[in-house]
Amino acid sequence: MTNFIRNILVKITGVGRCGTPFIQMEEEESRKRNFLKYAIELSSESVKQGGFPVGAIVVKDDLIIAQGLSNGKNNKDATSHAEIEAIRNASRKLNTRDLIGCELYSSMEPCLMCFSACYWAKIRTIVYAVGKDKLSKQHYEGLYPLNKINSQNNKKIEIIHGKDLENDALVVIQDWEQKNKK
């Protein structure tokens, strides 16, 4: 369907197939894109602070509740990933371990530890920019399929790959890799 026809349908009916409002779908995509862009900006900040090129945020009710940088090396803490930091900060801010109704946005596909933390925190949606298939092996301990693991969970997490911002995140990662070549 062309945008022209789509716009006419919105003006006439306000809805698309199955009664889904077009405008709402476009706004949702734009909202997710903006949050993901911010997570990518945080990945650049993480690098500036001497960390790994990953940034993450936790969002609830369209508000950024918390953010995290990946500074495990500086903090001498193997669990100090951006997603974990964002979850910890959100839990402190909301004074709960259950982040029901929250979404996590990360510049990079979460590792198993971070995915598991999202599961235990009851985060409903994960949106990430760059998938592990686009990265060197130094970023992950194996090519485990998150979707397959998620399919076996009692409660599924919606996992969204924001492919249109993948190159933006890759630029930060590739710059970091160049500076840290041994």
Image (cartoon, rainbow, N blue to C red):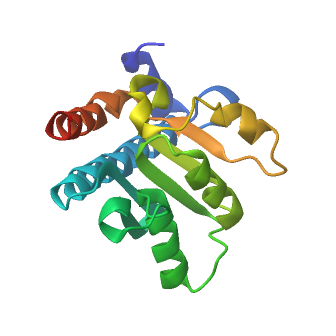
The answer to whether any part of residue 130 appears in the image is no
The image quadrant that residue 75 belongs to is bottom left
Residue 151 at what x, y percent from top left?
Answer: 78, 37
Q: Work out whether 128 lies above or below 45.
A: above
Left or right of 135 on screen, residue 104: right
Residue 169 position in % (x across, y down): 29, 37
Q: Residue at x 80, y 46 (%)?
A: 153
Q: Tell me which corner region of the image, top left, top right, bottom left or bottom right, holds residue 118.
A: bottom right
Q: Nearer the viewer, residue 3 or 59?
A: 59
Q: Is residue 61 above or below residue 109?
A: below
* Name of the residue lying farthest toward the front: 182
The answer to which quarter of the image holds residue 30 is top left
Left or right relative to 155: residue 145: left
Q: Position of residue 179 (x, y in %)?
A: 14, 39
Q: Is residue 34 placed above or below 117 in the rendered structure? A: above
Give the residue at x 45% y 41%: 128
x and y, in percent, of residue 79 in the image: 50, 63
Q: Residue furthest bottom?
A: 95
Of the 4 image quadrants, the one containing the C terminus is top left
Compared with residue 117, is residue 108 higher up or lower down, i.e. above or below? above
Residue occupying image coordinates x 73% and y 41%: 150
